[in-house]
Amino acid sequence: MAILNKIRQKTVVLILVIALALFAFVLSSLFDNQNALFSKSPNVVATINGKDISRQEFMARVEAQQNPNATTTQIMNQVYEAEVRQAVMETQFEKLGLNVGRQQMRDLLRANLQSSPQFLNEEGVYDEAKLNAYIANLKETSPEAYAQWIAYEDNVSAGALQQTYFNLVKAGTTATLAEGALEHKLEGDKVDVKFVQVPYTSIADSTIEVSKSDIKSYVQKHSKEYEVEASRNLQYVKFDEVASLEDENLIQDELISLIKGSVSYNAETKKNDTIVGFADMSEAKAGVFVNENSDVKFNDAYVLESSIVGTLKDSLSKLKVGDVYGPYKDGKAFKITKLVAQTKLPDSVKARHILIPFVGSRAAAPETVQTEVEAKKTADSLLAVIKTDRSKFVDLLDFSIDKVSNEAEGVLDWYTYNTMTPEFRDYTFENKKGDLAVVKTDFGFHVVEILDQKNELNAYKLATVVRNIEPSVETEDKVFREASNFVVNTEDKEFQAYAKENNLPVFPVTSVRVLDENIPGVGNQREIVRWAFEKTRSVGDIKRFPVSSGYVVVQVTAKNDAGLMNVEDASITAIPAIRKEKKAELIKNRANTSSLEAFASSEGQSVKTASAVNMKNPTLAGAGKEPLVVGTAFGLKEGATSKAIAGDKGVYMIQVTKKTPAVKLDNYQSYANQVGEQKLNAVNTRLLSALKDAAEIEDNRANTIQ
């Protein structure tokens, strides 16, 4: 009872403790969830100058893009850049109070649509009333089409505002006469010099030691060059699904059975069915057989001997029509080939034609009205006339829709076998010079005359069963097991050591960023990148992934935070730069003379000369562009010699032999104009980048887009 009384007396304290515990629990859960309180909603792709881009509207724009040659990630990046550009420009429009008024929009639409037939009146003049009627009809009949029209107007308006903004910036971009005078001085001031160059290559890289602390110091000193986004380093091994020798032998055995044919028991008829082999098959059935049994469809055309390569070419001369050659390996396939027919064909033909289209043919124009039957009658009539008098062929070209060949009197000059559509090709190659006929193709009816043929060659019609060399199901299962076993075994063993035990090369990948999709060596692997950046991912984690060639087993080897690049990654560019600095110090420390000749002699170099050097193009003949060296020369008096200077390609000592000042002008306006033109060009190329750099952009794509 005494205990209960004490508890009652401390009730307020207990309530306060419980409340604080609950509050602490809530706070911890909020801080554990990075999307809570201070983080952006997962539905916000980016925030640009305070404006949120929602995931819904962003993905709608991505889905609206039509680009079969781009990956989804590439399209997303393109849309993101467009959104950033639009938001950055809109901020500028709002600051300046720029907008497109009603009359300006009318003028813009007139400029864009004045050649569109649907908005022209009877006199062929742009009619705004027609445009207004068109928009009103869209609004009434199709909300979707009307929304597209509004989007079109928005694009026109945005384009006009951007042009106005650029013009305003350009209007304020000028160059003064003082700038013109400086430009003239940079071009006109000249010096003649003698110099000695000691190339950095004169000291072997192997003699220069670069420590990790050297790299770290260099990175910190050049921090802007080494700022990086968060990234991951990976390593992986590949397990390729490649057909085994057993798989290849099985494919060959199957092809041999196709050649010989087979007898199989039919459970329904309770009789043996005889399947005719490829070797005993007639020409008419060979094509059907190929289409039923081959990975490549039958090509019902002759092949000229000159275009046949490989072992088949050597064996063709020994085959008779009906014979089968193979199985033989050709690249990544096994083949069996039946010689269906043999003849002689020219390697090129010259012909002329009159093309009569019909409704539905590929050559039909919008005004074509003839049916197929009517077009055939027209072609037959023209053929009859030409047969009686071939000189009338050119006169009848008005009937032909092929305006290109019409300009050459209907002539198609010397084309090879596979140039023309099959029906046209077959007639002109398989018939004789002077023959006339009507030939139907997908384009229409052709009245054809064979004008000439040359270079008869052996030609073969071949029926080829192709079986691509692919791994069997058993081989695929084996590769899957090997990849899976690698994952299991590397839980207890070091990744690279176990790979070496199994003769598997390890492929390292550095600096993979959160929005990347390409993994060198395996291509587009967005799934691997997403996995590497998951919140729960740790260094050392391993996973198997399917790829187009089989499987890869990937391990995370490093998690690099945003900031300065780590020493290992920075070493690629830092080490050469550090070596150059150290070599420069070595050479400068050896330069204990003020004489060019003595310096050249001690370093095994020669004294060189360069004339009319200016600061606009700071180049030394025989040494290349060396701005610091040339700048030093302009700071010396005539006859003076510099100390050793660390340049871009080596260490230099330079002596000024002559200084020629620029000729003074009465007016520097022409040079000021040059500078002004350079500034205007810079507006076009650099303004948008400068606005983006100055904008506040919070990129949240990594958390919102998978």
Image: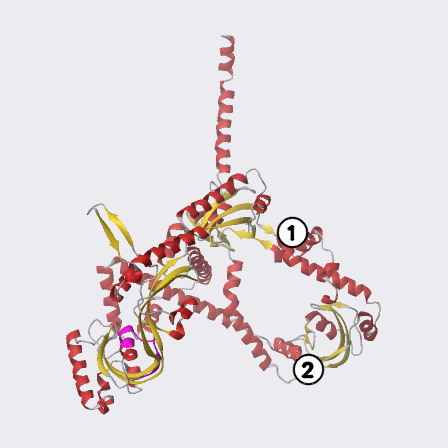
Quadrant in which residue 332 is drawn: bottom left
Front disc: 1 or 2: 1
Q: What span is colored magenta in the figure?
A: 412-426
Residue at point 75%, 64% (across, down): 203
Residue 428 appears left or right of 97 = left
Viewer-closest of 75 and 6:
75
Tag count = 2
What amino acid is at disc 1? Answer: Val
Residue that carries the numbered disc 1 in the rendered image: 567
Quadrant in which residue 193 is drawn: bottom right
Residue that carries the numbered disc 2 in the rendered image: 662
- Residue 184 lies, in percent from the top left, at 64, 79
Question: In this figure, which colouring scheme has been used for the structure?
Answer: secondary structure
What amino acid is at disc 2? Answer: Ala
Q: Residues within 10 Å of mark 2 (few under 14, many from 20)?
A: some
- Residue 345 lies, in percent from the top left, at 33, 78
Q: Residues within 10 Å of mark 1 (few under 14, many from 20)?
A: some
* Residue 423 on the magenta span: yes
Residue 425 visible, this orientation: yes
Against 514, is 462 above or below?
A: below
Q: What's the CA distance linking mark 1 and mark 2?
A: 48 Å
Q: Secondary structure at mark 1?
A: helix
* Residue 129 on the magenta span: no
Residue 273 appears left or right of 477 = left
- Residue 526 lies, in percent from the top left, at 46, 51
Residue at point 69%, 71% (across, down): 626
Q: Residue furthest top?
A: 1
Against 266, is 663 above or below?
A: below
Residue at point 70%, 69% (across, down): 628
